[in-house]
Image (cartoon, rainbow, N blue to C red):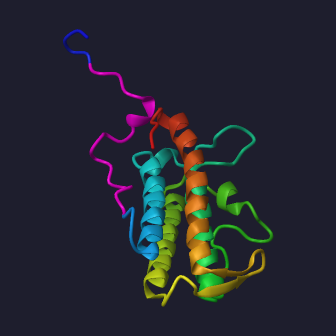
Amino acid sequence: MTAGMTTPRRKAEIFVGAGTDRRFEGPATGDERHMLVAFLGAQRATLELKCAGVAEELSRRSVAPSTLSLLGLVRHLADVERRWFRRVLAGQDAPALFSSADDPDGDFAGALPAAAVVATAWEAWRAEVAFADGFVADAPSLDVEGDDAWRGTVSLRWVLIHMIEEYARHNGHADLLRERIDGAVGV
């Protein structure tokens, strides 16, 4: 290589610089609860990372006719957190914030390019994450159960695993959405 050139890197390494990403430093051995919480935390942090620095473009759609957007994902995941932790496990009367029986895709369709819509989505998502984190911390065990119309009886353990899967799937969508916005790619 000539002077001034750098070693080529995989495109996926460009988004977050080597040595600066702390999302996946959770425990690899030990207590199951701590491991599951760390994995879920890493997935949540990935969503935040994919949305960072592009607030004005969070509502940009993937491709017509899809309503998929980063903002839609934030709104959707706020509703998902709310459903599993508040309604199913805590037994609260907590209807979805962004979708309903009359507007089942409201989480995505309502993700509009307005500062107030973006702020509301992030506030709701952070409130639901905080509730979930508190619920998990206070639960006597991962065997705490709740009843869900779709799955029947579920345990906190199952919900945590499901939430990791839910975020991981949607973070894959977020990768493509973010790349469409500004070309940023990465893990």
Q: Residue at x 68, y 37 (%)?
A: 63
Residues 59 and 12: in front is 12
Residue 83 visible at all: yes
Where residue 103 appears, as percent x and y from the top left, is 77, 65
Where residue 134 appears, as percent x and y from the top left, is 44, 82
Where residue 43 appears, as percent x and y from the top left, is 48, 58
Q: Residue at x 47, y 34 (%)?
A: 182
Q: Magenta stretch: residue 17 in it?
A: yes
Q: Quadrant of the C terminus?
A: top left
Q: Quadrant of residue 34?
A: bottom left
Q: Quadrant of residue 37?
A: bottom left
Residue 75 visible at all: no
Q: Residue at x 51, y 58 (%)?
A: 118
Residue numbers of the magenta segment: 6-26
Where residue 13 appears, as percent x and y from the top left, is 39, 35
Q: Does the magenta stretch mainly form a helix, a strand or a loop? A: loop
Q: Quadrant of the N terminus?
A: top left
Residue reaching furthest left?
A: 3
Q: Is residue 106 left or right of residue 163?
A: right
Residue reaching furthest front?
A: 29
The answer to whether 108 is drawn above or below residue 178 in the figure is: below
Q: Residue at x 31, y 40 (%)?
A: 17
Q: Is residue 184 left or right of residue 173?
A: left
